[in-house]
Amino acid sequence: MDGFRYLDGVATVRLADAACNGCGMCAEVCPHGVFAVAERKARILDRDACMECGACAMNCPTKAITVNPGVGCAAAILNGWLTRSRPSCGCGG
């Protein structure tokens, strides 16, 4: 999945800066390098690389990250790859 890109501007991942304790779990578990930690705070480097797997939110001890895992076109693309069928997210695109 090298070079995986999501549709621009539609990923549901959000980070509440005030709640972040800078532990770095999000950066450690994210398979696409969406997060980085600098100056004891996480930040989103590339929102559109997010595949909405939910690993970041599940591993965030302060619940600073929210994401709707398994939704939208990202889930459709992954399911298409796994089933070797044409991806369909139901949006008509």
Image (cartoon, helix red, strand yellow):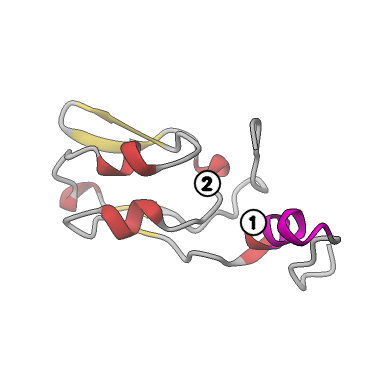
Which corner quadrant holds the C terminus?
bottom right
Tell whether 48 sits left or right of 87.
left
The x and y percentages for residue 72 are 64, 65
Residue 70 in magenta?
no
User: Closer to the camera, 88 or 1?
Assistant: 1
Label whose residue precedes the other's in the sequence (1 or 2): 2
Reply above or below: 18 against 92: above
Which residue is rendered at x = 26% and y = 42% of the image? 25
User: In terms of secondary structure, where does tag 2 sit?
Assistant: loop
Residue 49 lies, with reference to residue 53, above or below; the image says above
Horizontal side of 88 relative to 47 (left or right) equals right
Position of the N terminus, as image quadrant, is top right
- The amino acid at mark 2 is Cys
Q: Is residue 79 magenta?
A: yes
- Along the line of sight, the residue nearer the viewer: 15 or 52: 52
Please tell me how many numbered marks the rendered image carries: 2
Circle 2: is it few (<14), some (14-19), or many (20+) Cα within 10 Å?
A: many
Q: Which residues are magenta?
A: 76-84
Residue marked by disc 2: 50
Asked whether the residues under the numbered discs 1 and 2 touch, taking CB atoms below 8 Å apart as contact, a structural biologist would say yes
The percent position of residue 50, horizontal first and vertical second, equals 52, 46
* Residue 75 rendering spot, x and y as whole percentages: 64, 61
Q: Residue furthest top?
A: 39
- Can you tell which mark lies on residue 74? 1
Q: Check the image and name the residue furthest to the front.
A: 83
Dominant secondary structure (helix, strand or loop) of the stretch shown in magenta: helix
Residue depicted at x 27% and y 38%: 42
Is the residue 82 above or below the residue 9 in the image? below
Q: Is residue 8 above or below residue 81?
A: above
> In the picture provided, is 13 more to the left or to the right than 60?
right
